[in-house]
Amino acid sequence: MGYQEQTIEGRNAVIEAYRSGKAIDKIYIQDGCQDGPIMTIKREAKKHDTLVKYVTRERLDQMSETGRHQGVIAVAGAYEYAQLDDILAAAREKDEPLFLFLLDNIEDPHNLGAIIRTANLAGAHGVIIPKNRAVGLTATVARTSAGALNYTPVARVTNLAKTIEELKKEGIWFVCADMGGTRMYELDLKGPIGLVIGNEGEGVGRLVREKCDMVASIPMKGDIDSLNASVAAGVLAYEIVRQRLQ
């Protein structure tokens, strides 16, 4: 996994980046831009499932390093993404029950980095994130992971719910975090398992939750009703670790 974060500015530069096969996580386009090159960029973004955000010119001016953004700035991933099949193959080589983290639209790079760090320390074989409406492997994610991104592969998929369906064929059981679920201590979390964590505001989406076999709640006694996504991931991950060590 090589470190290769890059900001790409300018219409032709972004188009050429797509044509060269560079993985682009996100594109910022100035509100109201509808000319030929911008429409080409939008088509490429749709084809590659790139997240597109429409922002003001002032916002692009703030983001720009060159001052010549021409109404568009693209952000490429800091690290290369793994293939899901490679993650599964590596787990088989270790002859361990599969342990995956699946993240439903985590948008905060600090949360993603912290979750990747937890995944590594808990012994997970990989992390799966969706291509759309979620943060990619940016430099902030890499820094927050404290080096874990060099060891824990991250795969991106188009549809998380369909990916869960496919992984069930591998004998994996899926548990998602939700306040309305069964207390995590009462669930059997041993064996091949996928831990599904939702985003910072809305939690696990309905379609993804419906694909999960179990819904786990974390006992809470305080005055507020939810944990930060990365903290919830850590608590549940180490309940899985505890059960595996028994």
Image (cartoon, rainbow, N blue to C red):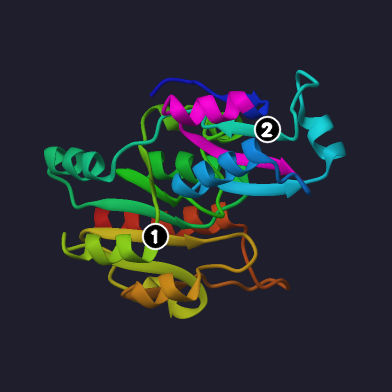
The amino acid type, in three-letter code, at marker 1 is Asn
How packed mark 1 is, by other alpha carbons closer than 10 Å (few <14, some 14-19, many 20 or more), is some
Give percent across and percent down for residue 177.
47, 68
- For residue 25, which numbered disc appears in the image? none
Residue situated in front as seen by the camera: 133 or 218: 133
Regarding mark 1 in the picture, which secondary structure is present there?
Answer: loop
Residue ID at (16%, 59%)? 170
Give the magenta-colored segment's residue range. 12-30
Residue 17, magenta (yes or no): yes
How packed mark 2 is, by other alpha carbons closer than 10 Å (few <14, some 14-19, many 20 or more), is many
Residue 220 in view in this figure: yes
- For residue 73, which numbered disc appears in the image? 2
Residue situated in front as seen by the camera: 223 or 45: 45
The amino acid type, in three-letter code, at marker 2 is Ile
* Left or right side of 55 for 18: left
Q: Which residue in the protein does label 1 denote?
A: 159
* Left or right side of 197 for 72: right
